[in-house]
Image (tube, helix red, strand yellow):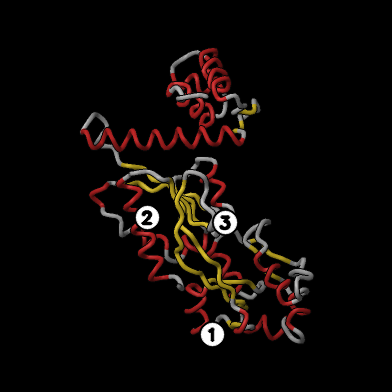
Amino acid sequence: MVSELPLDQVRTLLAVVDEGTFDAAASALHVTPSAVSQRVKALEQRTGRVLLLRTKPVRTTESGEVVVRFARQLARLERDARAELGLSGAGEPTRVSVAVNADSLATWFLGALTRVPRELRVCFELRREDEDHTAALLREGLVMAAVTSSPDAVPGCSVRALGRMRYLPVASPEFRETCLGGPLRDALTEAPVITFDRRDDFQDAFVRRLGRGQGGASAVRHLVPTSEGFVEAVAAGLGWGMVPEMQAAELLSAGRLVNFAPERSVDVPLYWQQWKLDSPALAAVAAAVTGTAAEALRG
């Protein structure tokens, strides 16, 4: 049974993953490529598992993800400890990486970050990703926390409910008149639709719910990969789409959008997942996010 993971080997593995190749990691660590290779091989022998796929760039295996996540958490704890001890480099800002979906980023999330005390000197590194996929970034150790749609905690992480983001099926008044006449489900299978990207299945799922699991939205679809651009595309009449209630409210009041199925709103539950670390900066971000979410999202 392995009692410990040598820290120099763990840090070397992380360097290889971050730099992409053994040669680049060697340059970053100021050692030879042979030394990097030997450390990674020794770590794999110690764990009894293959940790890296030797591609270009390298890719972690499932076991490798566990070690990389441990390495990032270790680095975070080391920086926090040095800051508390007043050692060299303690004046550097603390970096907190968070994965967040585009709609949260465009509505309530940035307001949460303004609540983090400035004296903590936190620098935010935000990675935009769909809420169905942010947990993968946590699992790979690429972020410290995430807004996700999954209530199932990633190993090594805690999870808490944030609330529900409500989405409304909306279109411009002109679009509804010209494209959404007749039975709604039939109209939506033919009418142009706005989607965020090629992985966005939200509009299709809405149509399937109308058809009891059958079909999907029209093949005539416009991909608009920003939350703000998505709403503007719908308001401009390019197609219909599912828009967050918080973004739609003003446009509905102004008559630029209409809710063409008011009884068919969709609530998406959101959760906050984060590393289980005793980090003052991460704790402050979590408190700010959960507090703001309680005010902005539906319970």
Q: Nearer the viewer, mark 1 or mark 3?
A: 3
Give whichever of 225, 262 is nearer the camera.
262
Inspect the image, locate mark 2, and give the three-letter code of the amino acid beneath it.
Answer: Ala
Q: Disc number at residue 286? A: 2
Marks 2 and 1, how far apart at CA: 37 Å
- Which residue corresponds to the image point at 59% horizontal and 82% vertical from the top-left? 259
2 or 3: tag closer to the N-terminus: 3
Left or right relative to 279: residue 149: right
Left or right relative to 74: residue 260: right
The part of the image, by quadrant, that contains residue 85 is top left
Q: Secondary structure at mark 1?
A: loop
The part of the image, by quadrant, that contains residue 92 is top left
Q: Nearer the viewer, mark 2 or mark 1?
A: 2
What crowding class fits label 3: few (fewer than 14 Cα within 10 Å), some (14-19), or many (20 or more)? Answer: many
1 or 3: tag closer to the N-terminus: 3
Residue ID for mark 3: 130
Tell me residue 155's x, y (percent).
51, 44
Q: Secondary structure at mark 2?
A: helix
Residue 274 drawn above or below residue 203: above
Tell me residue 25's x, y (percent).
50, 23
Inspect the image, locate mark 1, and give the three-letter code of the amino acid beneath it.
Answer: Gly
Inspect the image, locate mark 3, and give the three-letter code of the amino acid beneath it.
Answer: Asp
Q: Secondary structure at mark 3?
A: loop
Q: Nearer the viewer, mark 2 or mark 3?
A: 2
Residue 209 drawn above or below residue 127: below
Which residue occupies the extreme front position in the image? 1
- Which residue corresponds to the image point at 57% horizontal and 47% vertical from the top-left? 136
